Image: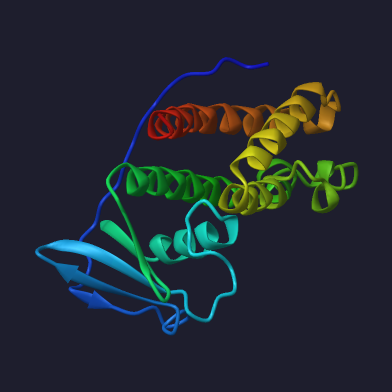
């Protein structure tokens, strides 16, 4: 297992006083109250429980928050309203930060980066397109797990780390080494997220 470090980062940007997502305009709206961004989710048409502990609900809120910055409170508006702020929003912000980082890491194309530079290697290259450790396949799967079930995400994360560490194919060594280092970097932020979750559960 590779070493684990701890790091924390957070990003903020200004947003308009009022916005609605084009793709989810019927699902939520964003407004400003006393300089604070408030995300209001329309949960009336959803059959699930309006609670961020429910993975379907959390996934919808994360998708909405990811489209905007500086959301200070989240309101789940059903026949009754449930408001989240403070530590709950900080945890969601941290999850979004990790998701954005994984999106960035998923842009690495092993074929172009490691094989197309040298035409002599193209013929003998591995089947990167079908490889589950390909960053363009692996990180989107991890993002999907993180949005739904943090426990399942952690298990899949460790599974990928072990597979990368065990891969001994010479032609894959550069890619697996770099991808393994990417996962170690993610673990730094994940350690912070876990600490935040443990603190909130006290």
**Quick one: quadrant of the C terminus?**
top left
- Inspect this view and state whether residue 2 appears: yes
Provide residue 97's location: percent of width, then percent of height: 42, 46
Residue at 38% in and 71% down: 80
- Inspect this view and state whether residue 69 appears: no
The foreground one among 178 and 114 is 178
The foreground one among 198 and 124 is 198
Provide residue 71's location: percent of width, then percent of height: 28, 59
* 94 to the left or right of 57: left
* 29 to the left or right of 153: left
* 197 to the left or right of 102: left
Residue at 64% in and 49% down: 145
In the image, is residue 41 above or below residue 133? below
Number of marks present in the image shown: 0
Residue at 59% in and 61% down: 56
Most distant residue in the right direction: 124
**Quick one: quadrant of the N terminus?**
top right
The foreground one among 55 and 153 is 55
Residue 2, picture quadrant = top right
| Colour scheme of the rendered structure | rainbow
Residue at 54% in and 64% down: 49
In the image, is residue 107 above or below residue 167? below
Provide residue 29's location: percent of width, then percent of height: 33, 76
Most distant residue in the left direction: 34
């Amino acid at each position: 297992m590779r070493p684990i470090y701890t790091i924390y980062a957070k990003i903020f940007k200004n947003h308009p006083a009022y916005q609605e997502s084009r793709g989810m305009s019927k699902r939520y709206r964003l407004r400003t109250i006393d300089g604070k961004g408030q995300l209001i989710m329309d949960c009336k048409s959803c059959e699930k429980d309006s609670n961020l502990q429910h993975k379907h609900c959390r996934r919808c809120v994360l998708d909405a928050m990811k489209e905007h910055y500086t959301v200070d409170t989240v309101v789940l508006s059903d026949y009754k309203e449930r408001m989240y702020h403070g530590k709950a929003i900080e945890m969601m912000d941290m999850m979004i930060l990790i998701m954005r980082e994984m999106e960035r890491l998923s842009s690495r194309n092993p074929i172009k980066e490691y094989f197309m530079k040298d035409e002599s290697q193209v013929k003998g290259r591995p089947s990167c397109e079908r490889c589950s450790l390909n960053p363009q396949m692996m990180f989107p799967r991890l993002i999907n797990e993180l949005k739904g079930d943090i426990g399942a995400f952690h298990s899949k994360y460790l599974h990928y780390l072990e597979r990368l560490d065990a891969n001994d194919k010479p032609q894959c060594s550069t890619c697996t080494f770099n991808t393994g280092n990417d996962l170690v970097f993610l673990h730094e932020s994940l350690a912070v997220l876990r600490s935040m979750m443990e603190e909130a559960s006290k």
